[in-house]
Image: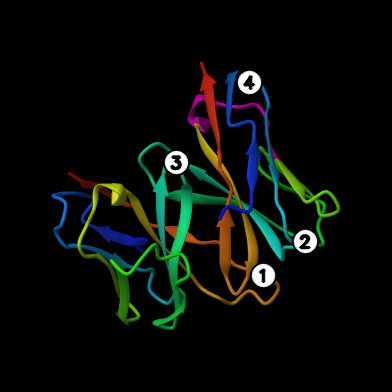
Amino acid sequence: DAGVIQSPRHEVTEMGQEVTLRCKPISGHDYLFWYRQTMMRGLELLIYFNNNVPIDDSGMPEDRFSAKMPNASFSTLKIQPSEPRDSAVYFCASTLGTEILGANEQFFGPGTRLTVL
Amino acid sequence: SQQGEEDPQALSIQEGENATMNCSYKTSINNLQWYRQNSGRGLVHLILIRSNEREKHSGRLRVTLDTSKKSSSLLITASRAADTASYFCATDTGFQKLVFGTGTRLLVSP
């Protein structure tokens, strides 16, 4: 298996532009997570899906952020309009939720490094 | 918000020495996991310890969990330069959701 795939790996954009980050989870996994990592705030959970349905989006910073999962093999995280403070590394992770007694290990993608000028 | 606070924030040791990292958390958990992150890469799962376990081993890794103190430790024995990375604890708060700690940056010098 190729693991979790994210694209693009690097994105540089100007303030006000729309940014779309993409993720392909590991085949067969039923949970997908979007995280943001910065030096100041560490690794934050933005939103996660189970069977393509958003379960918890309480970490989404504001209305400029939106995420979709149209099918089991694809998810997007969109920022519109982007701002310099959105600069961060965005990770996608997936897992198979079989564990009854607690969360399973998550498999992370390589991340997308976003720079908003 | 972050559940786990890790200590120390940074650790510098020589190859062959042991490295110990600590994690404290705030609420009750189902399990606690440790992850490693190499520079510029995604996180990689190392080990999972359940709330009813006190100690677990995997190769050169030893993890302990004290639920009464809401703390865990990760011990890496006989460290190698390749162990240089950031290490994060993650607490399972339910429904497959993990909350990650602040991380410990480990530098192992040859």
User: Residue B50 at what x, y percent from top left?
Assistant: 74, 61
What residue is drawn where x is 33% and y is 52%? A111
What whole-number distance in Å separates the C-alpha atoms at marks 1 and 4? 34 Å
Element assignment for label 1? loop
Report the residue marked by disc 1.
Answer: A102
Instruction: Please identify, in this view, whether the residue under mark 4 or under mark 3 is nearer the observer.
Output: 3
N-term-proximal mark, 3 vs 1? 3
Query: Label for residue A24?
Result: none
State whether residue A110 appears in this view: no
> Pointer 3: residues within 10 angstroms few (<14), some, or many (20+)?
few
What whole-number distance in Å separates the C-alpha atoms at marks 2 and 1? 9 Å
Q: What's the magenta region? A: B74-84
**Above or below, B92 relative to B60:** below
Q: Give the position of the N terminus of chain A as an image quadrant.
A: bottom left
What whole-number distance in Å separates the C-alpha atoms at marks 3 and 1? 29 Å
Query: Label for residue B51?
Result: 2
User: Residue A13 at what x, y percent from top left?
Assistant: 14, 50
Report the residue marked by disc 3.
Answer: A40
State whether residue A102 appears in this view: yes
